[in-house]
Amino acid sequence: MAMIRVLHLRDTDRICGPGKTILETVAHIDRSRFDLRIGLFLGSREQNNIYYQEAVERGFTVFPLTSPWPYDPSLVARIVRYVEDNHIDIIHSHEYKSDLLTYAAAWMTPVVTITTQHGWIRNTAKSKLVIALQRMVLPAFDCVLAVSEKMRRDLLSVGVPPQRIELIYNAIVADKYVPEHSRRDSLKHEMKLPVDSVLIGNIGRLSPEKGQSDFIAAARILAGLRDDLYFVIVGDGPDRRRLEQQARGAGLDGRVFFLGNILDMLPVYDGLDIVALTSHTEGFPNVVLESMCMEKPVLATNVGGTGEIVQDKTTGILVERGRPDLIAEGIQFLLANPGIRTQIVDRAKQLVLTSFAFSRRTSEVEKLYLRLTGYQ
């Protein structure tokens, strides 16, 4: 059987959920049948970034696309040249910019086109315009991969033919998320918090769509009810300064902590008592899968495909988005019902291990690549 060569394109400078998915797919796919490369975009002043470094350190083939501005027309010609010189069979893109560049490249060279839709974030006028353009070209892709049933329905609504949509859920490599109970108190020690305190965490890019403002508002409610509750926000982004000001204005100095970006998240997960995902929009959040695998009870807002993982009071607590009062109420429920909390944690972990194992996802991706290239 011929080798199938795939170029993954994603515009990112960090290892977020989609970035992890790409890296783990390259690592776990059958290399005797598939040759996967990672194309990534760099600004003219960038030598590399965290995503680039991780890919290189893991021994993956990386195709850096350096340009002085994001939508440099020369990028299309460079992608086309790489596809032709390296006999690439499939371009697999992962967000707005790479989708538009892939669409343009496919007009210039015969190549199978796949895009994974991880979610749409409309924080600015620019992002709204780019998304509108992206949605216009999606029906032309050979395959549009949805990460949730909700995303599949959204794709149908923007005119993507149903026969071109493939539903493949996100997944995690469970072996990388094994709790180590001996370090459960290490985070509290580092933060100089009482060992018997309760630590509630929010993990994600600090950006409006992630809803950290609602998390802080809920923290204010909870902090007024119990003195032993503390809150950590893990991540960085454009909203950090505003969120820090909100926390100070709410009188939460010493109760809400901003930890910034942390590469090794395992000690953080081990140190948290509850994980709260308070997003206003999501695709299919890896942080929920990771938290469940690390045996942490999860509260999440019912957005995107989150409700396909978090079943209220069964595998987590599911609340309406934009409601700090309900976020606080859900956290209180978890704290007040340790027996139910234990059952939720056990069921959630079993769900991840049985339904969201990365080996299962990789097998589905391999079958998709074979079918689209005519080998199956």
Image: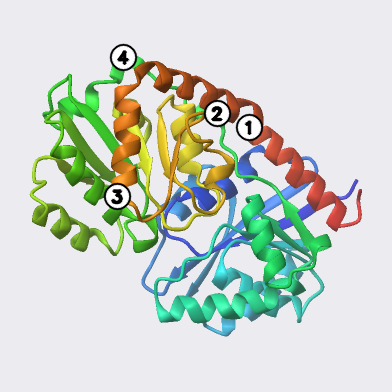
Residue 268 horizontal side relative to residue 32, left or right: left
Q: Which mark identifies residue 324? A: 3
Measured Cα–Cα span from mark 1 to mark 3: 32 Å
Q: Which quarter of the rendered picture does the N terminus lie within?
A: top right
Question: Is residue 68 something one can see in this rendering?
Answer: no
Residue that appears at 62% across and 34% down: 356
Report which residue position mark 2 lands on. 174
Q: Secondary structure at mark 2?
A: helix
Query: CB of mark 2 within 8 Å of CB of mark 1?
Result: yes
Query: CB of mark 4 within 8 Å of CB of mark 2?
Result: no
Residue that appears at 62% across and 70% down: 99
Q: Nearer the viewer, residue 252 or 371?
A: 252
Residue type marked 4: Ser
> Of label 3 and label 4, which has the lower sequence position?
4
Report which residue position mark 1 lands on. 357
Report which residue position mark 4 lands on. 182
> Of label 1 and label 4, which has the lower sequence position?
4
Mark 1 or 3: the one toward you: 3
Q: Secondary structure at mark 1?
A: loop
Question: Is residue 280 something one can see in this rendering?
Answer: yes
The x and y percentages for residue 260 are 26, 48
> Of label 1 and label 3, which has the lower sequence position?
3
Q: Secondary structure at mark 3?
A: helix
Measured Cα–Cα span from mark 3 to mark 4: 33 Å
> Of label 4 and label 2, which has the lower sequence position?
2
